Amino acid sequence: MSYTGVLLVDKPRGPSSHQVAAWVGDMLKSEVGHSGTLDPMVSGVLVVMLGKAVRLAPLLLLHEKEYVACLRLHADIPREHVEAAVKEFTGRVYQRPPRRSAVKRALRIRVIHRIELLDMQDRLVLIRVRCEAGTYIRSLCVHIGRILGCGSQMIELRRTKSGGFSVENTHTLHEVRDAVENGDEEKILSMILPPEEAIADIPKLIVRPSAADAVSHGAVLAGVGVIRCDKFVRGQSVAVVTEEGRLVALAQGLRDSEKFVCGEPGLIARSTRVFLSPTRSNKQY
């Protein structure tokens, strides 16, 4: 059986994200991809895409992330000083990828939406960070130590959320393996989320069946085929879905939503990733 959807894996420490995704692909005999690479010694939410859901990668890679990190200070610092230093990193921050990173060490700007001190014992500090994709938590931990004037380093990191996907909804590799070895198809299907779960936070264009079929054949979506839509601007990523909530395609808006009327002529969006099979039958994927 070929699977399409999203499997949330609780990545263990040790293997790389690529290895974990490859193991899932081997077990489920499916094409796979993953969004948001985790270093080998980092654990937590790894979003593994199966089958046609691999086409969701450009969208999922942009998801905000949440982490819980433990860092060690190199000197004894009062808790109130640490709390004050941590709060300074809310907002836009400048970062350079760590030396061990595989990407070019160019200076970049990332946004930290929320950061809080969860606990502190002696020189060990536990923080939770909600941040823009591509934020280096290891670098953040080093910079906190610099602000405090004592130095610090990250010693443990766990991703707790990726977009709207939480670690509470993940499955271990052992769970996947057991379901496969037991031939428990119902269990396997219960672990795989439909592609629609990944588009909860982007604008949607609800389209007629004829428009859905046209888009699946590569046509540019016109206003006559749109029943209703969320607010979006030109160039923004949108999801084209049926009235039943099935994902037809990811697309790029060609006009601001305020500049057209649903049901009237005019090109609205151009698909970038198509999920609906190009047929007028009831087959969806």
Image (tube, helix red, strand yellow):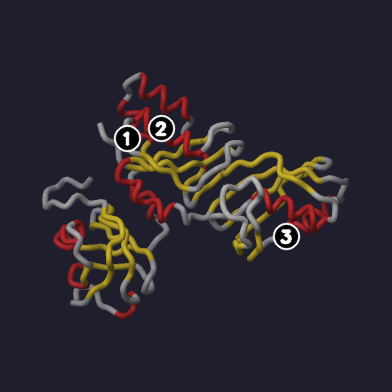
- Residue at 33% from the left image edge and 62% from the top image edge: 204
Residue 89 place in picture, x, y as percent: 70, 60
- Residue type indicated by callout 2: Val
Q: Is residue 165 left or right of residue 104?
A: left
- Residue type indicated by callout 1: Ser
Work out which quarter of the rendered image holds the N terminus and state it. top left
* Residue 87 image label: 3
* Residue 30 image label: 1
Residue under circle 2?
A: 24
- Residue type indicated by callout 3: Lys
**Could you tell me if residue 245 is visible in this image?**
no
**Could you tell me if residue 64 is visible in this image?**
yes
Distance Cα–Cα, label 3 vs label 2: 39 Å
Quarter of the image where one finds residue 81:
bottom right
Q: Is residue 271 above or below residue 172?
A: below
Asked whether disc 1 touches disc 2, contact meaning CB atoms under 8 Å apart, the reply is: yes
Q: Compare marks 3 and 2 and give the one earlier in the sequence.
A: 2
Instruction: Work out whether residue 252 or residue 185 is closer to the camera in this orientation and state it.
Output: 252
Q: Is residue 239 left or right of residue 89?
A: left
